[in-house]
Amino acid sequence: MRTWKVWEQQLARGISFLAAYSVIFILLFLLFVVFSKGLKALSWETIFSLPKGGYYFGGEGGILNAIVGSFYLSVGATILAVIIGVPAALFINVQLIRLKRTQNTIRYLLDALWGIPSIVYGAFGFTLMLLLGLHASLLAGIITVALLITPILVRAFDEVLKTIPVELQEASFSLGSTKTETALRVIFKQGLAGFITALLLAFGRGIGDAASVLFTAGYTDNIPVTLDEPVATLPLSIFFQLSSPIEEVRERAYAAAVVLTFFILLISVSARFLSKRYAKNIIK
Amino acid sequence: SSGRKKEQTISLSGAFALYPLVVKWSEEYQNEHPGIRFNISAGGAGKGMADALSETVDLGMFSRAISPEEKAKGVWWVAVTKDAVIPTVNVANPVWPVIQKRGLTHDELRRIYVTGEIIRWNQLPGISIDEAINVYTRSDACGAAGTWAAYLGGRQEDLKGIGVFGDPGLADAVVKDEKGVGYNNTIYLYNVKTGRKNPGIEVIPIDVNGNGTIDANENFYDTFNQVLEAIGNGAYPSPPARDLYLVAKGKPQKQATLDFLKWIVTKGQVFVSEAGYVPLPKEVLDEQVTKLQQ
Amino acid sequence: MKGEFGFMPFIYSSAYVTVLAFILSAPLCLFAAIYLTQFGKHRLLQVMLPVIDILAGIPSVVYGVWGVLVIVPAVAEYVAPLFGVASSGYSLLSGGIVLAVMCIPYMLNMLIEVFQTIPVGMKEASLSLGATHWEMVKHVIIRKGFPGILSAFGLGIAKAFGETIAVLMVVGNTLDISVSPFSPGYPLPALIANNYGEMMSIPDYDSALMFAALLLFVIILIINLFFRYFIHQTEKI
Amino acid sequence: MITYPVFSYQKAKRMVNHQEKQTPIIEIKGLNVRTREGEILKNINLKIPRNKIVVLLGPSGCGKTTLLKSLNRLTDLHKELQVSGEVLIDGVDILKVSRDLPAMRQKMGLLSQRPFPLPVSIYRNVAYGLKLKGIRNKDLIAHSVETNLKRVGLWDEVKNRLNSPANSLSIGQQQRLCLARGLAVKPAIILADEPTSALDPISTRIIENLFKELKEHYTIILVTHVLRQAVRLADHVVFMYYGDIIEQGHPDDILKHPKTEVLKKYLVDGN
Amino acid sequence: MITYPVFSYQKAKRMVNHQEKQTPIIEIKGLNVRTREGEILKNINLKIPRNKIVVLLGPSGCGKTTLLKSLNRLTDLHKELQVSGEVLIDGVDILKVSRDLPAMRQKMGLLSQRPFPLPVSIYRNVAYGLKLKGIRNKDLIAHSVETNLKRVGLWDEVKNRLNSPANSLSIGQQQRLCLARGLAVKPAIILADEPTSALDPISTRIIENLFKELKEHYTIILVTHVLRQAVRLADHVVFMYYGDIIEQGHPDDILKHPKTEVLKKYLVDGN
Ligand SMILES: Nc1ncnc2c1ncn2[C@@H]1O[C@H](COP(=O)(O)OP(=O)(O)OP(=O)(O)O)[C@@H](O)[C@H]1O
Ligand SMILES: Nc1ncnc2c1ncn2[C@@H]1O[C@H](COP(=O)(O)OP(=O)(O)OP(=O)(O)O)[C@@H](O)[C@H]1O
Ligand SMILES: [Mg+2]
Ligand SMILES: [Mg+2]
Ligand SMILES: O=P([O-])([O-])[O-]
């Protein structure tokens, strides 16, 4: 009896240990492949200069256009997604708390939006652009990517908000807060860690997506100065260089992936660090 | 002055295949004409066509044959360079020495790729090795596959084989599979700098006259320059050789655009080879110039 | 594309790779999340989170290339011969594996978040009744987190189902209904992605592909309906 | 715009002078709360007099908490609860209002049975309500935080860790914190659900004295299980049983001369 | 293999006969619990005699709950707490064991201060511990659920909704449910953290009587704030203050002749 329990515990522990480490192994392996191929092509020039003539034939230059472009685009889209998504998630969990059916319908639809290929978002964004008379530009890219990542942000955040005990809302309401105040000052804070996770997931999807911006953001060797100029992004730059006939250029694609990796790492570590500082208040 | 600025800016979008070359052209052109600004973005041939037709850009970069539907919509085009699709095979394939000598005829390629009648090497006369033929094709809708299919009398979706994404992908699949057969744009087969074929992959010579062997005039695959020459002078059939275009909706009105196009089909042609494409033959270039001057 | 679109093979392939991806990744993520939040050192989790974030942000082309470099040859040279099958490696199995890896960051991140929100008091209650750590996990973490687990799975599946580039790079894109995981397939999103470039310029493609997208959407709705139902069932307690 | 102090002592006094002292501040008419499984509150009718301490007694599970929550309309948060009837606060039916709900709720401070600190620091927990009221003046807030923490006897224990998370407090400390938080907004009516259940005698005494002092200006509804506390504090006692009010009146009447058997037993066990 | 009842009355009796009745069942030596901010428990030394009720008294926040949690090693779940010292349960240091931890924990039933029902139905909450012990016999389980719910006086209130989720119960009901849940596993030692804090007098009396009856066979450590309860139940009283044990002894000594000022004040306020 006892021994079986101990055995079961050891087994479960073993399995989950294996699972955790195989996930870690897979992830590190993937990063290893990227790094081993990309590091030798990585140089300061890659990071700090624009593509020069013939860059795509293995000539001089760098991918500064894509780095800055990705930064503009993903940060812009994430901000837009937060502006739309956070109130939406809070609305679902505070305003609609009694309306379980409505809540579930909204969740259902949002879940479905997760599964639509980003290409379709791209096509949708493109159609939208044509309607609005926009051409491929930073703005159009931001809007399209925001459309793509908002459902991710909302649902991932919502999943955490869902678990917050009602008593916490009761406490806030009984002090006379409105629903908005409760949502922003209490529920949001309690769900902060979840919000950061959701934010990073959405940001990750946004910065890593090539298909949705292919038609909407264009691709250019310049850094956009205004919102209506086309913009290059790292994933597109990677995509594009990977299809090059020249081996060195393909290596540069991996170098671009390495840059992207560091970029996300930076954002992730700082966001998580900040959230940790505030998350200590969370009621367990 | 903003109107003037617009007059002096040329925007292009479209095929990735043409993007590096157009970027190169634009830079060289800018050196000569400092007042001109370029706005070039890549996004695929389809996007180039769509943008050009909706007049969101001045010129679309386009890498396959222009379809009748597109022509019906009033597309205007200028051929700017040339490329070709060449069938390939793995170097380590035991059949390769034989193939090198006898080549494959149009009909044999068709029976491998379109009808699917030939699935083993020994079905071909003169070959006794009983091995499967692993056929690979492009999965993404693209100029290369379209052109290859056009040569074999079909459309891209008629091509048999495992679909692999992208030119490098297809080359890679053939390199990895000893029994593999595929096709590629020239620059994915040859190293532009050395002029040699990339390691692991070999060309299937086309037996153009169908006499069962590769004659001297059919044997031009050794170096890149030889192939380019053969494509240029028509010794290599077209299709699978093809023209690449810049397109617009109707003839462009903007003077800057017209000037740039004119420069491309004249002076600009010297930059074509280093990008791995084939300069257009003289008479085709002349045709384009006339088209521009009309 | 053929003039007439028979969508069955596409749907079949999509379902195949998705189910495969789900079978491979869901238990892995569940147990990994359990280990990271319940058994492992806090440090490990701290290190893992940014790594997961990175993986959520790596473009799918890179996953695709990784698949071509690693998974496809592995399937062709090791896995398929193991079962006595000849395979080029461009197969449903490769597609499933690559998809599974791509789902990991999403599922894992959400699962970790779900597990971390479970009140300590409840864990205490279970432990003080003499549950082993594992029993506590089973009865409290998994039980209480069940709706969340289902949500994470549902979202992971949806993500897998709609993934395009990475799959199409390894799956072989061949119209063929075959039960063997070593044969190539042609999932619906790959169809859209492969023809995306041409979509805008050829009117026929346009509507056919949009129909494919719609079909995809409907299928995702159906899958989610299924998950919703179970979430609803388990949310009551 | 600083609207503080909305319910200051002065203002509260003036209000009282204006209105008749006798009109009840809360009037509950035919209040019913039910779930699908059955009724939790059955046709409750009750008048709560102004500036008095009304004590709710009754066995565990009889519906006291539910009654308090209905007064504050926190029942909204639980979709399984169906509420009907009227709850008039100063003549306004809180079950009907919509826009003014937060303001009405702010009139009533609910100290919930299970203390739930907000996910912020100890200091910010107390400051929370004030900030909601739009008070920005730092000194005013700091002063109020200190005063109220002192009032509930928590100041000494937490003064060195005001910025620590509130969730690291012991349960009794959390209970006092929530009390301080509730008092800081100066509600006209205090709904206290077993506010001393987790407190030691010394802290309990402090809170009891506080309540006695507060009733000068506030109306207090207190749920307790401690009969002695009821005796010490109550102006009016309400005894509930299975969702019904079965006895009510002055503590001397009720607690000395119980009419029903349940109450008799309750009193015997409680002493 | 059914090993039930592991701690049956019979077996417990036999154990007692075997071992010396006098050896303490728990011995705490130099127990320290600290956070980064300071010490919560300071060098606690305490012997808990077998088959007695030991009552822990002390002001809110003095560390009673932390002490109980350390006995059960639930402090493991709070990474900010650092525990050092020795806690010998029947001679085994629970702070050192690893593999047998669940078994050791099962010896002790912790009834936590804030009731936390498990995320299952009412019935399954009580059955939970039994299932953990490997009991599969449905009748046995049903019988135990009923008996224990009756013992804590909850049966009548919940018998018609045994399959409802446990979190819809009132707090007092939850508290009794958790008590029943804890008793069902028949732990040798019961650690009860204010088990009647949310209960009315009648229910409280039921629980107190239950404890009196239980101590025949079990050892009980009880945290309470109600002095009368301490008087009614305690065999031994421990008074804690700011993480220290400052007085302990027989209730008649301690509660009638307090030595320290704090305890004196505590006693005055408590009566
Ligand atoms: N996880 C923690 N982190 C930091 N401080 C803590 C933590 N848990 C408890 N404390 C502090 O330790 C002290 C003792 O807490 P404990 O919960 O043991 O008190 P208690 O005697 O049970 O009080 P009460 O009667 O109010 O329940 C308190 O001052 C509390 O704030
Ligand atoms: N959300 C709910 N769903 C179903 N039943 C509920 C719900 N809330 C309360 N009840 C039931 O209503 C009855 C009254 O609950 P309430 O919490 O008001 O009791 P109480 O008088 O405050 O008891 P206690 O003194 O134990 O806190 C109880 O039987 C409880 O089980
Ligand atoms: Mg209650
Ligand atoms: Mg305590
Ligand atoms: O890349 P292509 O479309 O020219 O084959």
Image (spheres, coloured by chain):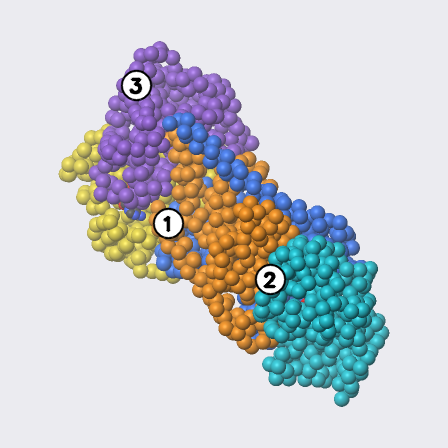
Chain colours: A blue, B cyan, C orange, D yellow, E purple
* Image coords of residue A174 (percent x, y): 39, 49
* Image coords of residue A224 (percent x, y): 70, 66
Q: Residue at x 64, y 74 (%)?
A: B150
Which residue occupies the foreground of this view, E270 or C215? C215
Q: Residue at x 26, y 35 (%)?
A: E138
* Image coords of residue B200 (percent x, y): 73, 55
Where ligand 5 lies, by image quadrant? bottom right
Mark 3–mark 2 Cα distance, whole angstroms, equals 80 Å
Marks 3 and 2: which is nearer the front? 2
Which residue was labeled with disc 1?
A: C235
Answer whether labels 3 and 1 touch (C-beta < 8 Å).
Answer: no
Q: Amino acid at mark 3?
A: Lys
Which residue was labeled with disc 2?
A: B119
Q: Quadrant of residue E134?
A: top left
Q: Chain of mark 3?
A: E
Badge number at residue E11: 3
